[in-house]
Amino acid sequence: MTAKHVLIKLAQPSLRNVVFQRLSENLGRALRLPSKQTIRSEIPPTRKLAESAESIPNLQPLTIHLSPKFSGESKQLNRLGEINLYTVKNARLYTDLRNRRLIWNKETSTLLTPISYHYFEDSAPNPRPLRPVHRVKGRSICLWNGGAAENYFHWMHDVIAPIALASDQGVAINFDDYLLPWSSSQFQTETLQQLGIKLRDCLSYLKFNWIDAEEVSFISSTRFGALGCHFSKPAIESLRALWIPESKQSGERLIYITRRDAKTRKVENEEEILSFLEPLGFEAMELASMSVAEQASLFQSCKVVVAPHGAALANLAFASPHCHIIELFPPNWVTSLYANLARTVGCYYHFVIGEQLGRNQSAYHVPLDRLKPLARDSLGM
């Protein structure tokens, strides 16, 4: 059978669903955790980007080793973990935020590969843009770290977490300008203010995605591994510290997070699920209208969280250790992202893979016979 025939067959909905289901089952077995014990993953070191930095003009890397405050649970993590801060003088920057962050030495038009990412090689723009370039004087920091500006998960874990960690390690976050994936969302404004960053100093990529910078710094990512699905525990602790006091005790709340107003990955039989969960004491919660502080407090107060896969689970960073997480997946989108975040925090993690019953690809059905035993076990029933 040729590759062309395979692609044709996979395009048939019935066979495609079978393939996705098999893949989901294999991944599911890999993710499953014992229900009565917390497994803490061994977090690999933050990816170093400076392999060839010394040979690139105007690129000045600075490695920041983690302080002893993070040595409590894992000496190996403390030994291996580090973040990198880079400073580039006379640089030209471009981003579309989703697929490309490109930085050139303006004098030589050399692409600085250690701090650039580019997922599609045939779409790299020329360093001589057609549109006007915004010039930034003084010291700036670039946080074009990938993901959509409107997405809560990417903002919290690709923008805020690296700043919080760097600040905890003694980096003075007091730049003249901040180059951000900023769209003036409520959660973005709140988090920047929490960090003490003045909004007047923020430049949005929506308006300025071609920039000439006199001096610009970059912080390496605090997510790493395949598809960025592993999390730096020190970065999560720095993020938690912004909203969760160490003295605050965990609670007993049981919540179900609804996606009824979302455009994709909606649960078709949500009312049926709630008719089962509500008598057990679960509350249905919609997070879109809540502040970050309210969301952090909510997750910290929970004993069990049941939620469809989505950006709201970025708040697992604020969950208490030993909280039970039950994630609901559509059959064609199964990922270990939140399983790894749950492990990093110390939560129990469970999941249910749903079914596609009709042609509506934006919604899926969650079999109650798969959800019920997990929910009851989480409650000790």
Image (cartoon, helix red, strand yellow):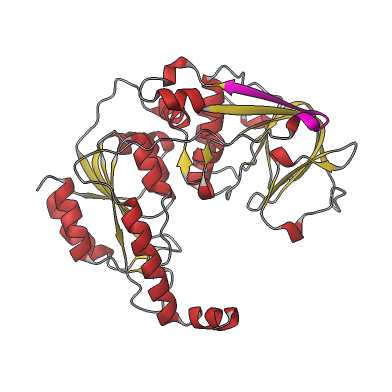
* Residue name at image x 29 percent, y 33 percent: 320
- Looking at the image, residue 298 lies above or below residue 15: above
* Spot occupied by residue 80 in the image (x, y as percentages of width and height): 50, 27
* Spot occupied by residue 317 in the image (x, y as percentages of width and height): 39, 37
Q: Which residues are magenta?
A: 54-64
* Spot occupied by residue 81 in the image (x, y as percentages of width and height): 51, 27
* Spot occupied by residue 301 in the image (x, y as percentages of width and height): 26, 35
Q: Is residue 95 left or right of residue 107?
A: left
Q: Is residue 116 left or right of residue 183?
A: right
Asked if the stretch drawn in magenta spans residue 57, the answer is yes
- Looking at the image, residue 185 lies above or below residue 268: above
* Residue name at image x 43 percent, y 31 percent: 233
Q: How many numbered badges does the structure rendering display?
A: 0
Q: Which of the two residues, 361 or 381, is positioned nearer the viewer here?
A: 381
* Residue farthest to the front, as pictured: 1
- Looking at the image, residue 77 lies above or below residue 31: above
Choose top left, top right, bottom left or bottom right for residue 183: top right
* Residue farthest to the left, as pictured: 381
One can see residue 295 in this view: no
Could you tell me which quadrant the N terminus lies in?
Answer: bottom right
Q: Is residue 321 left or right of residue 217?
A: left
Asked if the stretch drawn in magenta spans residue 343, the answer is no
* Residue name at image x 39 percent, y 47 percent: 338
One can see residue 217 in this view: yes
